Every structure is written in structure tokens, then in C-alpha cells.
Image: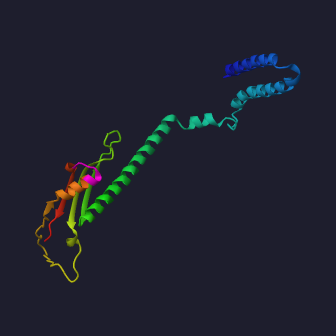
Amino acid sequence: MLSDVVRNIVVLIILVTILDLLLPRNHFRPYVNMVVGLVLMLMLLSPLRLFLQFPATLDPLPEMRWSVRESEVDERFALLEQINWDLTLERYRALMLEKITDILAQEGLAVVEITLKLEENINHPEFGQPQQIVVLAKRREMVEAKPGQVEKVEINIGAAGPETVAETVGDDRVERLLGEVLGVSVEKIDVQVLRGE
């Protein structure tokens, strides 16, 4: 610490001597002496500031470097980057679901359930691409009840009612249409349509 100050003073004296030899003596000498004096005073006072533990008002950067380590900055950057990718995938998934719903609506189908799996590995070449789309839909006629029609309801107390399993039929035409519009292989798409009763 003290050796650095002495070394800096010696270098300053050598530079001032060379500068004094190069400049004309009459015109610039008072200015050079004033600047050299100020620099010399600052160099001599800098170790005193550290000994007396003055607040670091003159040099805030080293204390800022000590308070936030580079590893912490890297961790925060990685966390923010992961949050950014998660938000991007979430928004992309919402847009894909909306697009699938619109395509099915144009085909007269209403969505009952959609399962959409995307490639979430950032380093994978197919990042963000759909890996599997499973759609369970029903015809619009089944969804829109006609006025005046009431379904028959059975109430069984104390006995388990028979489980009704809805029958579904695969729709290859809608699968091909979704594949063309979304740019996804048909093998990754499965569209099942509930049969009407």
C-alpha cells in the first residue's frame, strides 16, 4: 500500500521533470506547477483517508465491487434468463392453444380438453416445438342444447351408479389440418371426437 504510493510519487516526479524540460519555461510553468501540486497532494492524502476510515465518497466503485460479487451477478442473470424463457414458453403455449381452438371451431368442434407438450430444453434444436398434441373435442351440435329439451336424470341413493365411458373416434382429417397449419408432424397429433348419443 505505502510502496504503491511511493512508486506513484516517483513516477509523477519523473514525468513532471520530462514535461518541464519539453515545455517553454515562461508560458506554462505556473500552470504545470499548480496541476502537479494538486496531483501530488491527492496522492499523499489517499493513504491517509484509508488510515482514518473516511467514508468512501471519493471512490465508490471498489466498495460496490466488494458488496456484490461476480458470482452473485451470474446467479441473478441465470435466474432472470430462466424466468424469461419460462414466460416465453407460457405465452407461446397460450397462443398455440388459442390457435388450436380456433381451427377446431372452424371445423365445427368444441374443445373439451387439450394436452400440449412443448420441447422445453433450451439447448435442443426443436426448442419450443410441439412434441405432442392430444385433443378431446365434441361436435358443436352436442354442445349447443336445443331449447325445451331436458335430459333424463336418474338419482340412485346408496348404490354406485353405472360408470358411463364416452366413446371417441379419431379424426384424421382434423389431425392433418392441425399438422399443416401448425407445422407439426401428424404423428405427434391425436384428435379424438366424442360420439353423439
**Across the whole image, how many numbered discs are drawn on residues?**
0
Q: Residue at x 42, y 47 (%)?
A: 84
Q: Residue reaching furthest right?
A: 26
In the rendered image, the quadrant that contains the C terminus is bottom left
Q: Which coloring applies here?
A: rainbow
Q: Residue 176: percent from the left, percent from the top?
A: 21, 54
Q: Is residue 154 above or below residue 55?
A: below
Q: Is residue 137 left or right of residue 75?
A: left
97 horizontally vs 5: left or right: left
Q: Quadrant of residue 193?
A: bottom left
Q: Residue furthest bottom?
A: 148
Q: Is residue 182 magenta?
A: yes
Q: Nearer the viewer, residue 37 or 115?
A: 115
Pick the quarter of the image with the N terminus. top right
Quick one: 52 or 12, which is closer to the camera?
12
Horizontal side of residue 63 vs 179, given as left or right: right
Residue name at image x 69 percent, y 38 percent: 57
Which percent across, then down, holds residue 3?
A: 68, 19
Q: Is residue 157 left or right of residue 49?
A: left
Q: Residue at x 81, y 26 (%)?
A: 37
Q: Which residues are magenta?
A: 180-185
Image position, residue 63 (x, y; %): 61, 36
Q: Name the spot of residue 180 as percent of width and height, x first.
A: 26, 53
181 in the magenta segment: yes
